[in-house]
Image (spheres, grey):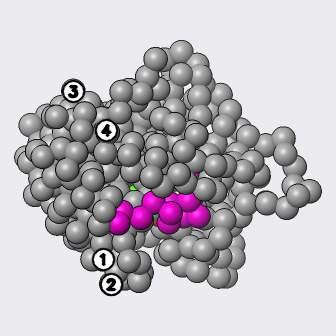
Amino acid sequence: MAEKIILDCDPGHDDAVAILLALGDPRIDLLGVTTIGGNAPLDKVTYNARAMLELAKATDVPVHAGCARPLVRKPKDAAYIHGETGLNGLELPEPTRPLDEGHAVNWIIDTIMGNKPNTITLVPTGPLTNIAMAVRLEPRIVGRVKQIVLMGGAYATGNSGPCTEFNVQCDPEAAHIVFNEKWRSLTMIGLDLTHQALCTREYQKMIAAANPRLSGALNGLMDFFRSTYQDQEAFPDPPTHDPCAVAYVIDPGLIETRRCPIDVELTGTLTTGMTVADLRAQAPKDCTSQVATKLDVDGFWNLVAAAVRNLG
Ligand code: BDR
Ligand code: CA
């Protein structure tokens, strides 16, 4: 049985790869895509999500637009990495499926409450505003979700600040709500893990060769992503964060994890938006949260290539 997931995202180059992976791998049943303002404003990331589904010929998948801004803080974007459109470098087809009606937060709640308990996995790859809103509006979803596997946070080095990661730093209050709920299981796929998922030129060649129809799009995506990561963060190749969360749902064997309590700093002068993972030996082990520590890099890119190949 394929894992039913809801992908809550802000495409974004790596979110776009996460969408392709979720669509192409037969072990995932992508129930819907929900969008959140993050890498670019809500209207742009919502358009990008729809256009990516069009590109992948997956117009049966609904897209619901979510929150346009964080709970408390002013919105910010990541145009310095993803360009003004959120997906610069990529020629996208015009979406033919109209945007689905209904706010993402309501759709997330209705979908979770309308399915059997313990069957739906939430995969957030943007700021956590929609998920926090859903939890506050219908707290029963927490006990019904099978697991939440999110891309966000870092237990060591940050990206948008010395110890903060972009998604969590965008809306730390929302992240605080999400990390403090009693999920059956919460896996933080943070920068500690995703900085291992570098799309080298060899891996780019491999995934582009897997699907001649999509090779132009994949090269456009990765060439732009590489250039901004080189200019802005001195990376040789782009860390392809978001599909790592989908990969964990498909094959947890690809990612090593460590169980630990995780909280979000809200009042630091230098650390607001930091995910604080208690990795001490004496930390309580009865929590249901864990951080991702080590990636099987080859296994991950082979998974992406196989999924892209399946998209035809
Ligand atoms: C995260 O921030 C966004 O720019 C990426 O899409 C990813 O979700 C990495 O910090
Ligand atoms: Ca993202």
- Indicate which disc residue 231 carries: 2
Q: Is residue 250 visible?
A: yes
Cβ–Cβ under 8 Å for marks 2 and 1: yes
Q: Disc 3 residue type?
A: Asp
Residue at position x 38%, y 77% in the image: 236
**In the image shown, does 212 or 232 lie closer to the viewer?**
212
Percent x, y of residue 300: 44, 48
Q: Which residue is mark 1?
A: 228
Residue at 79% in and 60% down:
279
Residue behind mark 4 = 307
Q: Secondary structure at mark 3?
A: loop
Secondary element at tag 4 = helix
Q: Which is nearer the N-term, disc 4 or disc 1?
A: 1
Q: SS class of the residue under badge 2?
A: helix
Distance from Cα at disc 4 to Cα at disc 3? 18 Å
Q: Amino acid at mark 1?
A: Thr
Q: Which residue is mark 3?
A: 60
Q: Does 239 sit left or right of 291 as displayed?
A: left
Q: Is residue 92 above or below residue 73?
A: above
The mark closer to the camera, 3 or 2, is 2
The answer to whether the residue bearing label 1 lies less than 8 angstroms from the nearest atom of ligand 1 is no
Residue type for callout 4: Ala
130 or 86: which is nearer to us?
A: 86
Q: Residue furthest right?
A: 282
- Residue span colored magenta: 188-200
Q: From the top left corner, tell me how far across and down residue 47 is, in percent.
A: 20, 50
